[in-house]
Image (cartoon, rainbow, N blue to C red):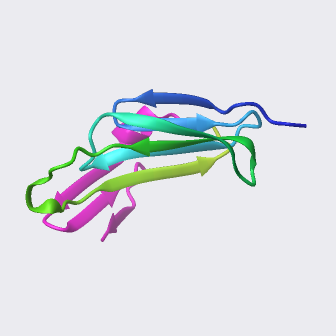
């Protein structure tokens, strides 16, 4: 059975692609990215079938100093995903090059 073209959704700071069988890939901008997002589509480009769709975030060229901190939340799942809810429920604080992410259940990660 050949799978069909993955569906795609986009919103401010997030993008999602979902296959016919529910495999979902989501990217969510937490810091540094523009609000604009996209979906890259290819045909016969990989081993997973004739169609692929990859969600991505955008960043405008010309950041001061040529560098920046970009924080992204990625989800790969067959469960239901609500990207805007993820974006609103995960907090991200950036000080210099240190990043602190707090998840809805209260767990915190610092890098």
**For the magenta stretch, what is the residue range?**
82-111
Residue occupying the point 77% across, 37% down:
21
> Is residue 45 in view?
yes
Task: Inspect the magenta stretch and tell me whether residue 20 lies in it.
Answer: no
Q: Quadrant of the C terminus?
A: bottom left
Percent x, y for residue 28?
41, 44
Residue occupying the point 46% across, 45% down:
27
Residue occupying the point 64% across, 48% down:
77
In the rendered image of this protein, does residue 59 appear above or below residue 38? below
Percent x, y for residue 23?
69, 43
Percent x, y for residue 9?
51, 28
In the rendered image of this protein, does residue 1 appear above or below residue 109? above
Give the tally of numbered discs.
0
Tell which of 76 and 106 is nearer to you. Answer: 76
Left/right of residue 82 with respect to residue 60 in the rendered view: right
Tell which of 111 and 57 is nearer to you. Answer: 57
Q: Quadrant of the N terminus?
A: top right
- Residue that lies at the very extreme toward the front in this rendered image: 44
Left/right of residue 6 with respect to residue 30 in the rendered view: right
Task: Inspect the magenta stretch and tell me whether residue 93 lies in it.
Answer: yes
Tell which of 1 and 74 is nearer to you. Answer: 1
Residue occupying the point 26% across, 40% down:
34
> Is residue 85 in view?
no
Percent x, y for residue 73?
42, 51
- Residue that lies at the very extreme toward the right in this rendered image: 1
- Residue that lies at the very extreme toward the bottom in this rendered image: 111
In the rendered image of this protein, does residue 76 appear above or below residue 86? below
Q: Residue 3 lies in what quarter of the image?
A: top right
Left/right of residue 17 with respect to residue 13 in the rendered view: right
């Amino acid at each position: 059975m050949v799978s069909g073209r993955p569906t795609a959704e986009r919103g401010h700071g997030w993008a999602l692609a979902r296959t016919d069988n529910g495999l979902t890939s989501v990217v969510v901008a937490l810091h540094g990215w523009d609000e604009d997002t996209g979906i890259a589509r290819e045909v016969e480009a990989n081993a997973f079938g004739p169609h692929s769709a990859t969600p991505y975030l955008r960043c405008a060229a010309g950041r001061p100093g040529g560098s920046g901190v970009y924080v992204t939340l990625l989800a790969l799942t067959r469960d239901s995903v609500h990207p805007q809810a993820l974006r609103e429920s995960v907090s991200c604080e950036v000080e210099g090059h240190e990043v602190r992410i707090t998840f809805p259940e209260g767990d915190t990660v610092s890098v």
